[in-house]
Each structure stands twice: as C-alpha cells, then as structure tokens.
Image: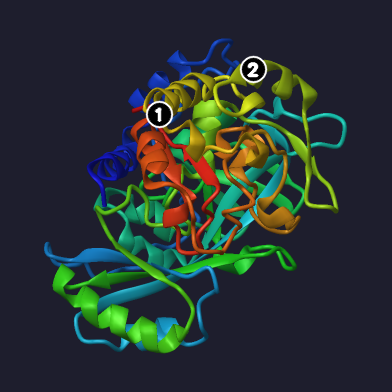
C-alpha cells in the first residue's frame, strides 16, 4: 500500500474521535445544513425489569475479531469457530435498515415526525444480549445484558441526532420501540441502535457478521483457516480490534450514523426501482451544482465540493488529466439504495459524498482499471477507493474525512 493510501487508512482509524472530525467536516460546508443541537442526554442507566445474565470476564490479553463476507455467513460458522482452541466467545450480529416515522419524548412531546409519507432510515443491529455483552467495555456490559424485547439501546451519536436518550418512544414502520438506555458508539459497533436479535423484523434483508473473542491475537490465523474452509470461494474479511474503528459489516466507509452526523440526516421514501424520494428541503440545503475541473458540472454535497475540487486540480496540475475521462463520469448525488436493491442498504451517493470516475472502464465487481496516480491523489484528499474493497467498485471514490 502506498504512503498516501496508508494515510487514508489512518484517517479511517480516526473516525472514532467523532466530534473533532464532525467539526472539521462542517467547517468545509459552504452553507451547512442545520443539524439538531444535541440535547443533554441522561447518564446511561439500566432498566430494572430484567435480570442481568452473568458473564465470565475475558483475560486482559483477549481481543475481538470481526468476520464478515458479502456472500453471507454459512450455516454453522458460529458453532465451528467456537470449537477452536483459544476462542473464548462467539456471537452473531444481524443488521437491518428500519424506517423511523415518529419519535416522542418520555412526556409524549413529538420530536420527529417526517411528512409526506417519508421516514428516517436507521441502521439497527440485532444482538444476543448475553453473548454480545462480552464484546463491549466492562462498564457497559450491564446495560447490554438487560436489553429487553420491545426495547432499544441508542448509540451516543444517535441519541444526539434523536434529541434524547432513555425514555424516548420511537415508532418505526417495523414496529414501536422504547429507548431503555444509551451506549457508546464503540459498544454499538457504529450502528445507530441495538435490539434483541429475536425481535428483528421478518421479511427485512439482514447483513450478518460474526464477532470472535480470542485469547490473544495469535489465534487469528486459525480462525482465518477455518473461515476459509467454510466459505469456499466466497470473499471474506477478518479485522482485529484496533484495525478498524468499529467491528461491523462493510467497514471500509463511514457508518451511516456518522454520515448523518457529518452531512445531515434526511427523511425519504423508498421506491420500488431502488431509488429514494428524499426530502426536497434537505436537498436544497445540502446539494450544490458546481463546475469542477476535468469532469464538468456535478451535483455534490457542499462539504465534498472543496476536497473534490482540490483533488481534481492536483490531477490536472500533475499533467494527469488524461486519467479522468469526462465522458465516463457517472455522478455524485444519486438518491438510491446500493445496487438499487430497495431491501438493502442506502448508497452513500444518496448523501452525495462519493463520485464515480471512469465508470465504464471500472464496472462494479470487475478488476479495477484506474491509474494508480489518480488513486493516490484522490486518497491524499480524503477519498477512499472502492477498488480496494472485497468486491471491487473501481469507479467509486468516497470522501471519508478531510485530510
């Protein structure tokens, strides 16, 4: 990996500092979208109605490992990994996209109520509370263990977006939830909320991954070998704790929660063709139509325009303008789901923080054909490149943080 690519890796590793990063991102917005001022969040408490499940504390050398694959988790993987020497615990996490139609305070005051049939997309992770508790900081295990059916734990950043914490009543298209507490973004794995996996919605697409608690990092190799046997020709990824800010599915880009924090939250209505009808007021506040070097007129998030302009100017100044074909520019703002699957996850093109360059020469899933020098310049300006992903998306450059 080049030094500039390593630099972007370091940028991604810094996502967890949240507030500093958010401030830096917002400083670049020419006309920033108003994000609700965070209300004071009550200190994290545990509901008294559930009985805590005791867990055996891991040794000081224990380390968590993420295992995920775009092809899904084969049946029996959790059990087979658990049988390996040096594995202390294993749990499955299942994530879904839910749609928030209303939120109310503990007193019943309406906080959010999107209009015109739109709703707010929220990434939810379904967990087994007694298993998952072993993978969070000791100070947060009790609140995880007491997560009950019908309840929900919000990540700290999500509680700020929602304007409250414990006591909130959230009504989703998939059902109502009461917020029983707030946990750190780390404990939530970068997801906006945690629920009991047994209460996930039926018929909603899930994205599964496995967390493994190892005695020490040297046990990773044995897990990798077992996973390889189980997934066959499927691509997969393992990440040790510390190699990525959050142990979660699809860890190459910002979690949706952080995208909202940095670039604004919208309400939208999914369409059957895989596109999204996004609140026009959000679009007016955040999307700018500008002329940029090499690619011409674009519609991008206002925060992304300065680094994208700077990157393309550097490409041109370096005499590398030929590496960007304006006829193959395939857009920035694209209100849609990934691969236009209306049951899947939302593309970050919906926030207009990614650009597709040289698209026809770099189709999704094919071996990338971008010039390495173009990639290095884009990465030096804070864009992660989809050509390095498990399933390559060579045309895709997504802004993750300002350099």
Residue 304 picture location, percent across and down: 52, 25
**Residue at the image point whose x is 44% and y is 46% from the top:** 385
Residues at badges 1 and 2 in contact (C-beta under 8 Å)? no
Structure colour scheme: rainbow
Quickly name the residue at label 1.
319
**Residue at the image point whose x is 67% and y is 57% from the top:** 344
Of 103 and 233, which appears nearest the observer? Answer: 233
The part of the image, by quadrant, that contains residue 84 is: bottom left
Figure disc tally: 2
Q: Which mark is residue 290?
A: 2
Determine whether the residue tagged by mark 1 lies in a helix, strand or loop: loop
- Dot 1 or dot 2, earlier in sequence: 2
The part of the image, by quadrant, that contains residue 305 is: top right
Q: Which mark is residue 346?
A: none
- Seen in the picture, residue 236 relative to 352 is either above or below; the reply is below
Separation of residues labelled 1 and 2 (CA atoms)? 23 Å
**Residue at the image point whose x is 56% and y is 43% from the top:** 179
Residue 346 picture location, percent across and down: 65, 47
Is residue 114 found left or right of 256 in the rendered image?
Answer: right
Foreground: disc 1 or disc 2: 1
Residue 115 picture location, percent across and down: 83, 29
Residue 228 picture location, percent across and down: 37, 83
- Seen in the picture, residue 395 relative to 17 is either above or below; the reply is below
Q: Is residue 216 visible?
A: no
**Residue at the image point whose x is 55% and y is 73% from the top:** 71
Q: Is residue 257 visible?
A: yes
Q: Where's the C terminus, which quadrant?
A: top left
Of 105 and 375, which appears nearest the observer? Answer: 375
> Is the residue marked by circle 1 packed among few (<14), some (14-19), or many (20+) residues within 10 Å?
few
Is residue 352 found left or right of 225 in the rendered image?
Answer: right
């Amino acid at each position: 990996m080049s030094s500039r690519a390593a630099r972007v890796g370091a940028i991604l590793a810094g996502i967890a500092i949240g507030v500093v990063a958010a401030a830096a991102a917002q400083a670049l917005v020419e006309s920033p979208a108003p994000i609700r001022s965070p209300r004071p969040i009550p200190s994290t408490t545990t509901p008294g109605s559930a009985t805590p499940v005791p867990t055996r504390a891991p040794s000081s050398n224990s380390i968590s490992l993420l295992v995920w694959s775009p092809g899904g988790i084969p049946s029996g993987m959790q059990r087979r990994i658990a049988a390996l020497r040096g594995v202390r615990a294993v749990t499955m996490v299942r994530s879904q996209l839910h749609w928030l139609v209303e939120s109310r305070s503990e007193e019943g005051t309406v906080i959010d109520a999107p209009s015109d049939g739109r709703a707010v997309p929220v990434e939810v992770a379904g967990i087994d509370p007694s298993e998952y508790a072993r993978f969070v900081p000791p100070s947060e295990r009790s609140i995880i263990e007491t997560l009950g059916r019908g309840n929900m734990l919000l990540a700290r950043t999500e509680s700020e977006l929602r304007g409250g914490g414990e006591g909130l009543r959230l009504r989703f298209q998939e059902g109502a939830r009461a917020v029983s507490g707030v946990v750190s973004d780390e404990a939530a794995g970068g997801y906006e909320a945690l629920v009991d996996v047994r209460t996930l919605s039926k018929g909603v697409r899930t994205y599964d991954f496995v967390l493994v608690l190892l005695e020490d990092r040297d046990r990773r190799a044995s897990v990798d070998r077992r996973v390889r046997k189980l997934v066959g020709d499927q691509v997969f990824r393992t990440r040790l704790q510390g190699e990525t800010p959050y142990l979660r599915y699809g860890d190459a880009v910002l979690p949706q929660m952080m995208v909202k924090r940095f670039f604004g939250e919208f309400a939208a209505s999914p369409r059957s063709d895989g596109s999204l009808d996004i609140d026009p007021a959000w679009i007016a506040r955040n999307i700018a139509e500008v002329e940029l070097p090499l690619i011409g007129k674009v519609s991008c998030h206002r925060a992304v325009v300065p680094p994208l302009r700077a990157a393309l100017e550097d490409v041109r100044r370096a005499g590398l303008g030929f590496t960007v074909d304006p006829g193959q520019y395939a857009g920035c703002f694209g209100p849609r789901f990934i691969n236009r699957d209306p049951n899947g996850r939302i593309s970050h093109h919906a926030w207009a923080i990614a650009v597709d360059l040289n698209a026809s020469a770099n189709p999704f899933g094919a071996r990338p054909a971008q010039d390495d020098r173009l990639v290095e310049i884009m990465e030096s300006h804070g864009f992660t490149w989809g050509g390095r992903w498990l399933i390559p998306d060579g045309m895709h450059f997504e802004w993750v943080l300002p350099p």
